């Protein structure tokens, strides 16, 4: 049973207190902080009107299977906690879940198939969690996902085809990681890609991004951009390649060959490097 709660009120008044759980009625939020012990399904089952669960700065020893599904949460935030290994079974019946944020939980480990049953999930954020390799298995079973954010996670490798199943993805944010290459294919609904401050060494392999409007690759390690690769993007895209060590020759060639086309390419005046 969870206990020892300290609540930070997000609205004027809190309503209800049961088993160490504070219910912020006006916001339909369960806000739990500085908890200790285990989390059980019955801890949440009386809060049928709750839409958001926030668990922060807590030390949890055990999480019962399907415990996070004890109320019809549309959003769950797990941040700055000490948590046990997260498994698929903990979320397997969370059929109402639309948003999930896992951020800054030191030493947290997760099963590769943890998200498989979240078929209605629309937004997934993984921030400051150690993920060395992102695989197809991690992102399988997310047919409704529209926004994916992975940041500050020491991500070094992205498996080829990892994003191929995210057919409804509209926004992709990969920020402050360490991967060197990226492939994006046949994501027809994708409108915005932010690949900022990673270790990308070459222009991503892209195709079938018909509705892409913004593609930001700033603060990476790209030294050369082939015009043929840019032409795989829709001509209306805004391509931001600022703060990359692009050679002046490559940048000149890019501008010359794409001069009569609609591409908008953003570079800093002094970005190019003499060879």
Image (tube, helix red, strand yellow):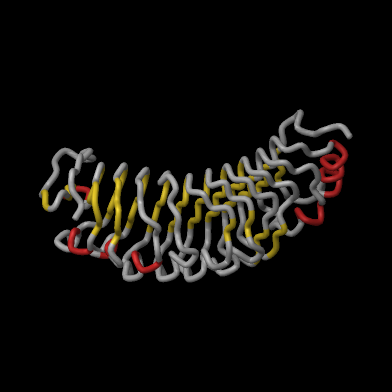
Asked if 91 appears above or below 21 in the picture, the reply is below
- Nearer to me, 258 or 230: 230
Asked if 89 appears above or below 18 in the picture, the reply is below
**Position of residue 226 measured from the top left corner of the image (x, y, whole percent):** 82, 51
**Which residue extends farthest top?**
270
**Position of residue 60 measured from the top left corner of the image (x, y, whole percent):** 29, 51
Quarter of the figure with residue 90: bottom left
- Nearer to me, 241 or 107: 107
**Position of residue 80 measured from the top left corner of the image (x, y, whole percent):** 37, 43
- The reply, left or right, for residue 64 in relation to residue 232 is left
Residue at screen point 63% across, 51% down: 156
Residue at screen point 25% across, 42% down: 34
**Position of residue 10 measured from the top left corner of the image (x, y, whole percent):** 23, 40
Q: Can residue 227 be seen in this view?
A: yes
Quarter of the image for the N terminus: give it.
bottom left
- Nearer to me, 95 or 4: 4
Residue at screen point 85% across, 42% down: 250
Quarter of the image for the C terminus: give it.
top right
Residue at screen point 44% across, 69% down: 116
Quarter of the figure with residue 166: bottom right
- The reply, left or right, for residue 40 in relation to residue 208 is left
- The reply, left or right, for residue 95 in relation to residue 204 is left
Give the number of callouts: 0
Asked if 171 appears above or below 247 in the picture, the reply is below
Q: Can residue 23 be seen in this view?
A: no
- Nearer to me, 93 or 187: 93
């Amino acid at each position: 049973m969870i206990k020892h709660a300290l609540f930070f009120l997000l609205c004027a008044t809190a309503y209800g207190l049961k088993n160490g759980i504070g219910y912020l009625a006006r916001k339909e939020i369960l806000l739990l902080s500085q908890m200790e012990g285990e989390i059980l399904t019955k801890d949440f089952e009386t809060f049928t009107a709750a839409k958001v669960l926030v668990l922060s700065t807590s030390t949890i020893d055990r999480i019962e299977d399907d415990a996070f599904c004890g109320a019809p949460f549309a959003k769950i935030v797990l941040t700055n906690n000490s948590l046990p290994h997260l498994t698929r079974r903990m979320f397997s019946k969370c059929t109402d879940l639309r948003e999930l944020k896992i951020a800054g939980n030191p030493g947290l480990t997760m099963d590769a198939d943890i998200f498989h049953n979240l078929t209605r999930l629309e937004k997934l954020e993984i921030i400051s969690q150690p993920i060395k390799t992102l695989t197809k298995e991690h992102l399988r079973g997310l047919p409704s996902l529209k926004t994916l954010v992975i940041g500050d996670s020491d991500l070094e490798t992205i498996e080829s085809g990892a994003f191929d199943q995210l057919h409804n993805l509209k926004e992709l944010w990969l920020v402050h990681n360490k991967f060197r290459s990226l492939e994006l294919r046949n994501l027809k609904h994708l409108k915005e890609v932010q690949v900022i401050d990673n270790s990308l060494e070459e222009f991503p392999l892209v195709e079938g991004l018909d509705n892409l409007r913004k593609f930001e690759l700033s603060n990476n390690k790209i030294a050369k951009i082939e015009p043929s690769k840019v032409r795989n993007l829709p001509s209306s895209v805004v391509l931001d390649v600022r703060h990359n060590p692009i050679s002046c020759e490559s940048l000149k060639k890019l501008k010359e060959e794409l001069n009569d086309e609609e591409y908008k390419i953003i570079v800093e005046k002094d970005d190019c490097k003499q060879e």
